[in-house]
Image (tube, helix red, strand yellow):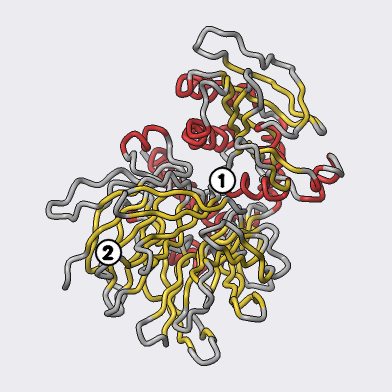
């Protein structure tokens, strides 16, 4: 009896130790004993004993500068030993079977060998035609989807070592356009996968995701390939979430876990909810809707498309105006031009002709970032939020746009998104999506200065992440909840006072407009949504419109 009791107690201590190691591993900075105890809900003396034992074994290390603990080097030694015995083919066996069953096309696993991609395993198509991708086949890392998936996780220096000409090359898209290699890599990193459709009558279409080792280095890629006649671009995007999931599970390295795949289950219907109208748009990641009262039209950006679109609520349709780099819509210039921003800078666009010009470039140091949203202050000035293309914490920023250029206003944010201002213009609100928070700060309209931010509202893990926001004329924030199947309205104290359920899991942004000014336009996303979720929520990627009742 005594032995059994000791065994149970020992297991409990072991599980607590593992929880502490995992918690420390997810923190971007060293953690103190007090922080660990508070966040894990453990007694401080218990945490102190366990952390001391872990430090003694080299599994945790004390950082004297920050007075906190981080992972110890012995963990990396153990990980290295484990990886020395990894059989990638064995780990991927069930995943290849699953991807073949889902797609009915050939599923392929391959590794990087120098500047080539080598097929090490594959499953034949269920259509009865043998694969043209035999085991052992070698092909250059560029321009196929599998090699590009690996390249998208390498830094520029390593890519230059593979091929000095790659960074200056171009990538041919499925619509025939050529884009710079660096922009193609940024899109792949932001999406978490790559797609490639060849040319000609017998073209091959592929979609692939990188497989990362325990240090986050790309060692392989897994994906699906087949005739372009059977695999359209939309089908490739729909297959991507299951491929990303397989890539993460093979090595238990989620890589960028902020890039979510599976949304929370669809909530039960709520009686009395307004029925949204729908405008077809097919956006991968719709954002920054802007209402034009004079035209009775909506404008928006598809960041991951990427594209600038306009939508007609009366006709229930949309059309693409331009296909720039990944970017956001800002609004209108004093001269009436449509203003958008992407990696090349600030653009002024004439919607009638499609002609556009760059007026200002972006600050240096944003090559590994993408724009995520844009706010408009009371004077009509634009504020851009940027984030790491891989959503790494601490690499987000706010950029201030002025007549003289674009400057960095605030750095070291997590994943900043929407910005909005109070009706009197003296308070600014900012969404920190990865932290599930909305912050607020004092704002000086005269010199356009932002004061220190403080928490305003927090959202539970079960309810989705805040993304885009919009302010109504009574000072209440409307919030789009990514993976939350809803938008909510907050009261002046930051509490949820109204929730509108939606037929899509990923609302992304919103604005008020329409003839009465009380139509809530909501952009949505279908990026990384599995095919089974898209079947349940086919309006994902469309624009929703809800007429709000006066209250």
Q: Residue furthest left?
A: 272
Q: Quadrant of the C terminus?
A: bottom left
- As displayed, is residue 208 above or below residue 34? above
Per the rendering, the mark at residue 313 is none
Q: Along the line of sight, which residue is nearer the eye, 147 or 80? A: 147
Numbered disc total? 2
* Quadrant of residue 370 within the rendered picture: bottom right
User: Dot 2 corresponds to which residue?
Assistant: 519
Q: Position of residue 377 (x, y in %)?
A: 47, 79
Q: Along the line of sight, which residue is nearer the eye, 87 or 76? A: 87
Q: CA distance from mark 2 to mark 1?
A: 31 Å
Residue drawn at point x = 45 percent, y = 47 percent? 283
Q: Is residue 339 left or right of residue 272?
A: right
- As displayed, is residue 309 above or below residue 153? below
Q: Along the line of sight, which residue is nearer the eye, 265 or 443? A: 443
Residue drawn at point x = 35 percent, y = 83 percent? 423
Q: Residue furthest front?
A: 353
Q: Quadrant of the N terminus?
A: top left
SS at badge 2: strand
SS at badge 1: helix
Q: Residue furthest bottom?
A: 446
User: Dot 1 corresponds to which residue?
Assistant: 191
> Is residue 494 at least partly visible in the picture?
yes
Q: Position of residue 59 (x, y in %)?
A: 64, 52
Q: Is residue 544 left or right of residue 375?
A: left
Which badge, 2 or 1, comes first in the chain's sequence?
A: 1
Residue drawn at point x = 49 percent, y = 47 percent? 14
- As displayed, is residue 307 above or below residue 427? above
């Amino acid at each position: 009896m005594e032995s059994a009791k000791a065994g149970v107690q020992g297991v409990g201590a072991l599980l607590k130790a593992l929880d502490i190691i995992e918690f420390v591993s997810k923190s971007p900075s060293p953690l103190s004993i007090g922080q660990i105890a508070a966040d894990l809900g453990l007694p401080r003396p218990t945490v102190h004993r366990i952390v001391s034992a872990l430090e003694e074994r080299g599994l945790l290390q004390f950082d004297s500068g920050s007075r906190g603990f981080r992972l110890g080097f012995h963990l990396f030694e153990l990980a290295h030993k484990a990886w020395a015995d990894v059989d990638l083919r064995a780990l991927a066996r069930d995943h290849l079977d699953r991807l073949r069953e889902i797609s009915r096309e050939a599923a392929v696993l391959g590794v990087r060998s120098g500047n080539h991609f080598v097929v090490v395993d594959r499953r034949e198509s269920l259509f009865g035609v043998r694969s043209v991708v035999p085991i052992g086949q070698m092909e250059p890392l560029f321009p196929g989807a599998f090699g590009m998936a690996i390249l998208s996780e390498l830094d520029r220096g390593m890519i230059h070592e593979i091929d000095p000409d790659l960074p200056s090359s171009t990538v041919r898209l499925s619509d025939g356009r050529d884009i710079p290699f660096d922009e193609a890599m940024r899109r792949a990193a932001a999406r978490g996968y790559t797609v490639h459709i060849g040319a000609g009558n017998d073209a091959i279409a592929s979609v692939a995701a990188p497989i990362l080792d325990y240090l986050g280095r790309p060692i392989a890629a897994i994906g699906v390939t087949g005739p372009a006649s059977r695999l359209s671009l939309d089908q490739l995007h729909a297959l991507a979430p299951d491929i990303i999931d397989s890539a993460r599970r093979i090595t238990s390295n989620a890589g960028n876990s902020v890039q979510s795949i599976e949304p929370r289950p669809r909530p039960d219907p709520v009686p009395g909810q307004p029925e949204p109208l729908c405008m077809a748009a097919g956006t991968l990641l719709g954002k920054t809707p802007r209402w034009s009262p004079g035209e009775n039209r909506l404008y928006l950006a598809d960041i991951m498309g990427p594209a600038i679109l306009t939508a007609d609520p009366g006709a229930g349709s949309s059309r693409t105006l331009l296909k720039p780099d990944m970017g956001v819509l800002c609004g209108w210039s004093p001269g009436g031009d449509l203003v958008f921003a992407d990696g090349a800078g600030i653009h002024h666009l004439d919607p009638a002709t499609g002609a556009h010009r760059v007026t200002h470039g972006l600050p240096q140091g944003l090559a590994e970032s993408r724009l995520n949203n844009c706010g408009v202050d009371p004077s009509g000035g634009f504020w851009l939020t940027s984030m790491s293309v891989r959503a790494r914490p601490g690499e987000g920023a706010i950029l201030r746009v002025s007549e003289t250029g674009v400057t960095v206003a605030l750095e070291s944010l997590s994943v900043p998104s929407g910005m909005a201002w109070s009706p009197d213009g003296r308070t600014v609100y900012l969404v920190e999506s990865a932290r599930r928070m909305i912050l607020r700060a004092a704002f000086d309209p005269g010199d356009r200065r932002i004061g220190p931010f403080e928490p305003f509202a927090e959202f539970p893990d079960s309810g989705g992440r805040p993304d885009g926001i919009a302010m109504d004329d009574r000072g209440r924030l409307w919030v789009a909840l990514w993976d939350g199947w809803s938008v909510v309205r907050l009261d002046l104290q930051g509490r949820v006072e109204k929730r509108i359920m939606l037929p899509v899991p990923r609302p992304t942004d919103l604005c008020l407009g329409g003839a009465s000014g009380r139509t809530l336009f909501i952009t949505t996303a279908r990026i990384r949504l599995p095919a089974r979720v898209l079947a349940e929520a086919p309006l994902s990627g469309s624009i929703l419109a809800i007429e709000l009742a006066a209250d």
